[in-house]
Amino acid sequence: MERIEKPIALVLISRSPHTNSAEIAAKISQISGIKLVYELTGNTDIVAFLHAKRMNPDGNAIVDQIRKVPGVDETDTKVILNEVKRP
């Protein structure tokens, strides 16, 4: 499989009440195409950095896998349009 260096999207994940965020994040981190996973505070519980050649169909398939993880209540995918580097 081709190695994709930069993420193409961020997946914001909300978990179901009374579920363990760390366990859900650990399961998501095992999905192929997910390189980084962070637990967060606030309305979003977890963010996953999605790496794929293109969003459709590759990235969508990865998001579908995330949605199947027990305890995942909702996802909100943000496609990265441009990287802004500090001068």
Image: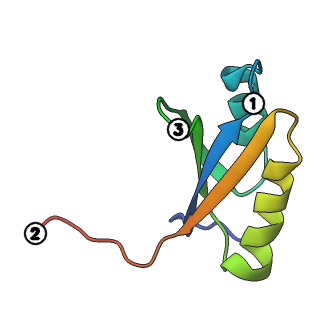
Residue 63 lies in what quarter of the image?
bottom right
Q: Along the horizontal axis of the image, is 33 left or right of 57?
A: left
In the image, which is nearer the foreground, mark 2 or mark 1?
1
Q: Which residue is mark 2?
A: 87
Q: Is residue 56 above or below residue 67?
A: below
Q: Identity of the amino acid at label 2? A: Pro
Give residue 1's quadrant in the image.
bottom right
Residues 78 and 36: in front is 78
Give the camera-side residue of 13 and 81. Answer: 13
Q: In this picture, is 25 found above or below 80?
A: above
Counting residues from the start of the chain, the first of labels 1 and 3 encountered is: 1
Q: Is residue 47 visible?
A: yes
What is the spatial separation of the Cα atoms under label 2 and label 3, in whole angstroms? Answer: 33 Å
Q: Which residue is mark 3?
A: 43
Secondary structure category for the residue under label 2:
loop
Q: Could you say which disc has been placed on residue 24 in the image?
A: 1
View extreme (left): residue? 87
At label 1, which amino acid type do we have? Answer: Ile
Q: Which element type, helix, strand or loop, lies under badge 1?
A: helix
Residue appearing at x 68%, y 77% in the figure = 55
Give the quarter of the image for residue 30.
top right
Sequence-wise, which precedes: disc 2 or disc 3?
3
